[in-house]
Amino acid sequence: MRLLLVGYGRMGKLVERLAPDYGFEVVGRLDDTNNIGGVGIPSAPDADVAVEFSVPSAVAENLPRLAARKMNIVIGTTGWQANEGEMKRVAADAGIGVVAASNFSLGVALFQSLAEQAARMFAPYPEYGAWIHEMHHSAKKDAPSGTAITLRKAMEATGYAGQIDMASSRAGSIPGTHTIGFDGPFETITMTHTNRDRAAFAQGALQAAKWVHGKRGWFTIRDVLGLD
């Protein structure tokens, strides 16, 4: 299968290195030297799937151009969700398959399921307050992280009606770390996921690219893993 990389930073390079393990040949690489405003997509090589790890502002420019070429897409960029409704309409009109996730780590997907279960169990006990704290390296642009926002929405969807306080820290080279907690009058319960290697995201994105090949619709990593 042919893979087009849209965004060729650290994640794009890591996806390229691991692509052969998933049966992909990288046929093109687009970045800020040849794809400002999505201008490089119309002339890029034909591909079965595009993996998009660029910057938030570029997603709304890249996706319509990829959709026009009937390429299925895996979106690993975060911070663009204000345009999600419009992007879903573009994808549906083009009849392509899209996997969009704030985090492609298998561990994070399972962590979200645990967070949902915990929120459901604590929902009947209003004396327990909930919070999410996420920490990342100083170069990460969006805060709170897309993963933290996804976790909060997932917890709220279970019926947890209490406020879920959100906090973000950006410093040095901190790996992606997400903690959810519940605090009661006499005790505290926490769960933490810490990413030690970006390879977890690249592997998940490639797994999603393989899964979405030939499919139509808008999906998440939970669909890929069969969690929904």
Image: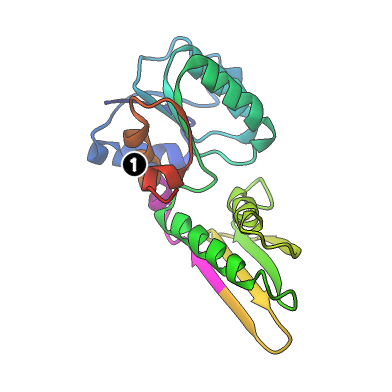
For the point 46% across and 42% down, which residue is it? 10
Disc 1 target residue: 207
Part of the protein shown in magenta:
191-202
**Image quarter of the N terminus:** top left
Residue flagged by tag 1: what amino acid is it? Gln
93 over 104 or under it: above or below = above
Give how far across and how far down residue 128 sits, in percent. Answer: 71, 77
Give how far across and how far down residue 149 sits, in percent. Answer: 65, 51
| Residue sitting farthest toward the top | 43
Give how far across and how far down residue 94 sits, in percent. Answer: 50, 15
Asked whether 71 or 43 is in front, the reply is 71
185 over 65 or under it: above or below = below
For the point 46% across and 18% down, which residue is it? 95
Asked whether 89 or 4 is in front, the reply is 89
Circle 1: is it few (<14), some (14-19), or many (20+) Cα within 10 Å?
Answer: some
Whether residue 171 sits left or right of residue 41 in the image: it is right
Residue 169: quarter of image = bottom right
| Residue sitting farthest toward the bottom | 186
